[in-house]
Image: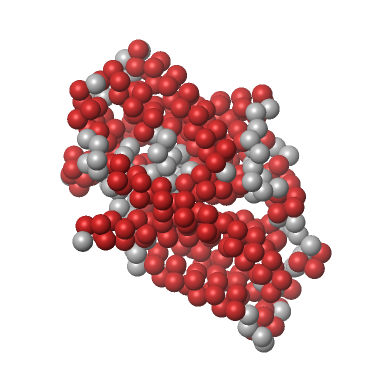
Amino acid sequence: MIMIEVLTDVLRNTLMITCFVIVIMLFIELLNLFTQGNWSKWLGKYEPLQVVIATVLALIPGCFGGFAVVGMWTHGAISFGALVAAMISCVGDEAFVMLVQMPQKAFLLFGILLVIGFIVGFTIDKLGIKVACPKDMNRHLVVHEHEQMSLHDLFGNWKSNFKQLSFTRVLLITALILFIYGMATGFFQHEHHGETEHVANAVTQSSYSLPLEEAWFNNIFLILAIVVLVTFVFVNDHFLEEHLWHHIIRQHVPKIFLWTFAALLLIHLLMNSVDMIAWVEKNQLWVLLFAVLIGIIPESGPHLVFISLFLGGTIPFSILMANSITQDGHSTLPLLAESKSGFFAVKSINVVIGLVVGLAGYWLNF
């Protein structure tokens, strides 16, 4: 019975993550169509701007910004330095707990992560360090002449799409409506398996009241999904079939879904077989290394342990900061599915940065 509940929860989280990523990818594809590819060309000319935009976007609490950055990199729209910088600043769902429980320290942490992300991202691009992204923007997001359309063409000819309604259009519209319904009803709200009782009670008893809740950001994403749904009605059959169905759905969904499901299931089994908190409390000097290595896990949950220990005064701010540098919630799960070399390159760099910053802060009693 317990195993069935675990599988159900893992499956729900897998569906949520897969749907989030695919909707963002669809939005990028549609954005490329409506701007005739000019947005990516403009962004591609300014690598420093890519770093700034990606880092700030990934700093948004939750995984929305991180998913968006990964989607842009896998399509070749931003540099590798921008991707690394974004994953440094991204904290995932743990940001909500920190904003509620320790808002002043949280903003200090986010500010430090932002600065470190800028420095590392600019340095990587300046040195010319690159990792090949899985898709070439010039080929993957090509816009043919017959696909270029004005707003008048877009909204004026939509009725012709329903004279002979295609199976693909029906499938995409139905699937997205179900996803939007699941978002609106809270079906995709995921659990944090690594959350400790201390953190849970602390959040409940918090005296702070901030308008930054996960539901607020989910509502923003819900609007984004509705925008994509509306475009499913208006775009022509060729674009729907070739770009949205073949390029996005068929190529990405199976890999992202299977890798995400396997990773979440493995993480759940590991987290329930290891008493991490006991080990951390007895090995203070080794906590930093452990915090950095735990950050490699592409999941929101295990990292809440370090927030709990920091709130209880068991570990210094520097260890929480080191963990925050290397961890990024669920954001790198789609990166793992799409580009394993990109995933391990990002994590390797961030582990080094996390260790250097964490050791410096630790010895300075910060």
Question: Which residue is at the far top?
Answer: 363
- Name the residue located 55 percent from the left edge and 66 percent from the top edge: 227
200 relative to 34 in the view: left or right = left
Residue 288: x and y in percent read 34, 23
Q: Quadrant of residue 84?
A: top right
Q: Is residue 39 visible?
A: yes
Which is more toward the observer, 190 or 150?
190
Image position of 124 with respect to 212: above or below? above
From the viewer's perspective, tell me whether residue 358 is left or right of residue 156. Answer: left
Which of the image's four quarters has the N terminus?
Answer: bottom left
Q: Name which residue lies at 70% across and 54% down.
A: 140
Whole-percent x, y for residue 272 in the image: 25, 43
Residue found 70% across the figure and 61% down from its top? 33
Q: Residue at x 19, y 30 (%)?
A: 278
Q: Position of residue 332 (x, y in %)?
A: 48, 43
| Percent x, y of residue 315 | 26, 24
